Amino acid sequence: MYIPSPTTINNLLVVSALLGCILVVYRESKPETRMGYSKFEQQDESILKIPSRMGMLVIYSPSVILSLLAIMLLPPRHHSNWVAFMCFLHYFKRVYEVIRVHKYSGNTSARDACLISMVYITLTSIFIYLATQVPFSIIDKRQVRFGTMLFFAGELVNFYHHRILSCLRKTSSDSGYKIPEGGLFKFTWCPHYVGEIMAFVGLAIVTQNMLAFPFQSASALYLGLRASSTKAWYENRFPAAVLRAALIPGFF
């Protein structure tokens, strides 16, 4: 794993990751500033909202385009091209799920959709940039293979549990929330977040650059806080539901 020198750009990247973590904790710890999508749709009528499906497309589509452009421009045999391809697969899968898997009923804050989209664009750019900085001679192919396997395992876990959530709504007009069952939902409220964290840890390993991990940590922190809020939301809405962890059984 490559440890980059403390250049100005690298120092700025570390600082930005730290600030990102602080911002995530600040926003997600307060209901009034929490990202306004899914079950946390904001009720303030003064906020510009768009249909949830459109909001999700706004969030993910730009990163599909960005990673595809990177694949076309990067050297075909450089491992940064593989990182760009993995980013493309992740966001393309999310767009596919938005169109073909998920059933939506509410609205999304247009401001938050654009903000999350910019965050994903930034993360995609940073992961690809960090991969290009790693000298080819020090790339550990075993780590790359392990990170790739972890990435695909995480994507499968994520997709499988998204399918379970989708099947809870039998028709497109069904707008109610139900208790998810099956798979890892038996143990945790957010196994789909577990899969996403696995995928991004795998991606960070494949970059072969240690600076990828502060940004992965910020992403995992966001999902962890979101999982905690989701657990509280379900327990408040379904007090008779079987107790389960927010994210990791026996730990969190």
Image: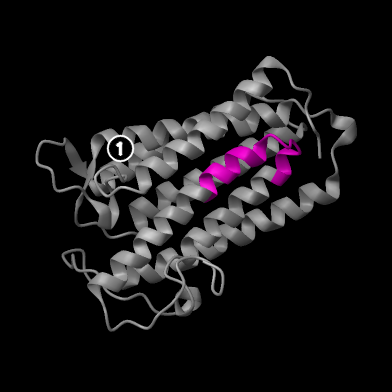
At a point 56% along the width and 74% down the height, the residue shown is 250
Whole-percent x, y for residue 83 in the image: 66, 38
- Secondary element type, mark 1: helix
Name the residue nearer the viewer: 241 or 167: 241
Residue 212 sits in which quadrant? top right
At a point 31% along the width and 47% down the height, the residue shown is 30
Name the residue nearer the viewer: 30 or 160: 30
Residue 66 lies in the magenta-colored region: no
Instruction: Please rate how many residues cluster around mark 1, counting C-alpha atoms within 10 Å: few if below 14, some from 14 to 19, many from 20.
Output: some
- Tell me if 240 is positioned left or right of 148 in this view: left
Q: Is residue 194 above or below residue 11?
A: below
Q: Is residue 96 above or below residue 61?
A: below
Quarter of the image for the N terminus: give it: top right
Q: Is residue 135 visible?
A: yes
Q: Amino acid at mark 1?
A: Asp
- Region in magenta: 205-220
Residue underneath mark 1: 112
Residue extending furthest right? 137
Q: Is residue 179 above or below residue 195?
A: below
Whole-percent x, y for residue 78 in the image: 77, 31
- Tell me if 57 is positioned left or right of 197 in this view: left
Residue 215 lies in the magenta-colored region: yes
Residue 157 sits in which quadrant? bottom right
Residue 75 sits in which quadrant? top right
Whole-percent x, y for residue 51 in the image: 20, 45
Q: Is residue 67 visible?
A: no
Q: Is residue 59 above or below residue 231?
A: above
At a point 28% along the width and 49% down the height, the residue shown is 37
Whole-percent x, y for residue 155 in the image: 56, 57
